[in-house]
Amino acid sequence: MQNETLLKREGLRILVENLGLVSAERFIALMRREQFDYTQWQRELFKDVPLDKFLRDADRYRQKNEP
């Protein structure tokens, strides 16, 4: 398990890599500004993704990003 500093660093790297620096900053500002239930947000985000596809994608991501 990663410590919090490494987790934050990796999360920021992923955001910047996928959104670009400006959009990553905007995303972080948006998340900080709004009061929201992360669990509910995540359920809504993935509600239309079949579990087997979600798990396959997660496994591919893990394999691609393992040290």
Image: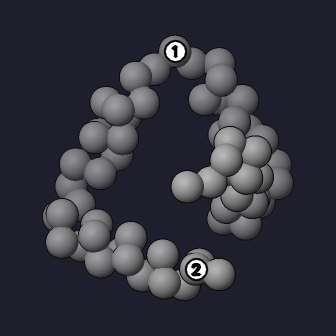
Q: Can residue 24 be seen here?
A: no
Q: Is residue 51 above or below residue 53?
A: above
Image coords of residue 12 (percent x, y):
73, 52
Residue 60, given in percent of the width and then of the height, sits at: 42, 82
Residue at numbered disc 1: 35
Report the side of 22 relative to 2 (left or right): right
Report the residue marked by disc 2: 66
Say if 45 sits above or below 49 in the image. above
Label 1 Cα crowd, 10 Å radius (few <14 / some 14-19 / many 20+): few
Q: Quadrant of residue 66?
A: bottom right
Gap in angstroms between the C-alphas marked 2 and 1: 33 Å
The mark found on residue 4 in the picture is none
- Quarter of the image where one finds residue 29: top right
Q: Amino acid at mark 1?
A: Gln
Q: Is residue 47 left or right of residue 58?
A: left
Residue 55: image quadrant is bottom left
- The 10 Å Cα crowd at callout 2, few under 14, some 14 to 19, many 20 or more, is few
Q: Look at 22% across and 48% down and name the residue there.
A: 47
Residue 45: percent from left, percent from top: 34, 46
**Circle 2 sits in a helix, a strand or a loop, which is it?**
loop
Q: Element at badge 1?
A: loop
Residue found 40% across the figure and 23% down from its top: 37
Q: Which tag is nearer the camera, tag 2 or tag 1?
A: 2
